[in-house]
Amino acid sequence: MHIPFIHEYSTDKRILIMRRALLGQVIVLVVLAFAWADREKTTQTAANGRDFIKWVDFNVSFEALCTAYQWDVETHGTDCEVDWVELLAYTAAHTGGEFDKQAVTLLDRTAEKIAKGETDMEKLSADLKYYSYYHEAYSAVLGGMVGAYEVQAEDENGHINWEDRYGLKAFFPLARGFDYTHYDDFGASRSYGYKRRHLGHDMMGLTGTPIMAIESGYVEALGWNQYGGWRVGIRSLDGKRYYYYAHLRQNYPFAENLEEGSMVTAGDVIGYMGHTGYSEKENVNNIEVTHLHWGLQLIFDESQKEGDGEIWIDVYDLTRFLAKHTQPVEKVEGSKEWIRTTDIKDPIVEKKKLDNSIKK
C-alpha cells in the first residue's frame, strides 16, 4: 500500500482548492453574462456614455389607449390632471407591458384615484421597477400626439376663427371619407429581395386616396426605394419618431411642393395611395394590391436610424386609435391635388417656424 508523503497530500489538496476556486469564478462569470444579456434586451450604451433604449415592444391595446386618453382629456385643466403616457407606463410596469382586460381595469382604477386627489403618479411610481423604462418608451411613441392646439372653425356668421383645443393633435393617415380595410399584419413574412419580417402596417384602399401626415415634422426622405416604391419619411420635431409612408401612386406620388427638408403640419396631405415598389426601376407598379404601408420607427440614439439597431413597432391598435381624428379634404379643381379643408396651429410647430426664421 502506498502511503503519501506529506508534500504529496498538501499538493493534491492545493490543486483541489484551486479547482474549486476556478469553478466558482466561472459560475460568477456565467451569472454576470446572463445578467448583462438581460440588460442588453432593453438598453445600450452610446459612444458618449449615455444609456439608451435598445428595444420596445409596443403592445398597448386600443382599449387602453382610448381609456388613458379619455382620462387625460377629461382631467385637463383640473387640480388633479391624469397624464395618459404616465398612466400607460404605470400599468405596463405592473403587467410586463401586456394590456388585457385586467390591465385596463387597473389603469381605470388608478386614474380614478389620481383624479380624486387620493394619490399622484410621483408617489405611485416611486419604487416601481421598470416604470422609468416604460415611461421613456411610451413617451417616444405617443409624446407628440396629445396636447394643446388651435383649429379653424366657422361661426354662425360664416366667419373663420381660431378655437383653442386640447386633445388628439395627431391625425389618421388617410383622409376622411375614403374607404379602406386593414388587419394586424405586423411581423408577417416578406420575401422580395430577401426574407424578412413586415415592420409596418398595410391599409388597403383606392389608388389616389390622399395620405395625411400623422404628426408634424420634417421631410427626411422623399423619392424612390426599390422596396417601398415612391415613399416619404417624416421625422418628428423632437427627433424620436420616424414615420414611413410607402407604395405611393405611380406618376403622381407626392403632394405639390413637398420636398426634403420641408416642414409639414399634422393633417397635411403629403401624397397619394398607390402600389409602386418591388422594383429597382423607378415608377413601377409591382405591388399587386393598392395600399398604404406606414411604419413607425423609434430613435433614442442616431446610431439606431439605420442598421441592425432599428426599432419598428406594431401600430395596428394605434391606427385604430388615430381614427378618432380624421382630416377632411377637397379636390383642387383642374388638378390631381387634394388639400385639407381646415388648418390647425400647433404651438410647438409655430415655435419651430419662428426659430427657423430667426436663424435665416
Image (spheres, helix red, strand yellow):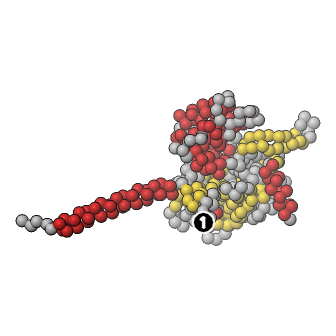
Q: Residue at x 58, y 49 (%)?
A: 133
Asked whether, in this view, residue 238 is left or right of residue 227, the answer is: right
State the residue in front, 47 or 276: 47
Q: Residue 94 at what x, y percent from top left?
A: 53, 40
Q: Is residue 7 visible?
A: yes
Residue to which mark 1 is pinned: 47
Q: Amino acid at mark 1?
A: Ala
Q: Residue at x 19, y 65 (%)?
A: 9
Q: Quadrant of the N terminus?
A: bottom left
State the residue in front, 85 or 279: 85
Q: Residue 287 at what x, y percent from top left?
A: 60, 60
Q: Residue at x 85, y 43 (%)?
A: 152
Q: Residue at x 61, y 60 (%)?
A: 50
Circle 1 SS class = loop
Up the image or down, 100 lies above or below 196; here it is above
Count of marks, rendered view: 1
Q: Residue furthest front?
A: 6
Q: Quadrant of the C terminus?
A: bottom right
Q: Residue 42 at what x, y percent from top left?
A: 54, 54
Q: Quadrant of residue 353?
A: bottom right
Q: Residues within 10 Å of mark 1 (few under 14, many from 20)?
A: few
Q: Residue 274 at what x, y percent from top left?
A: 67, 58
Up the image or down, 297 lies above or below 109; here it is below
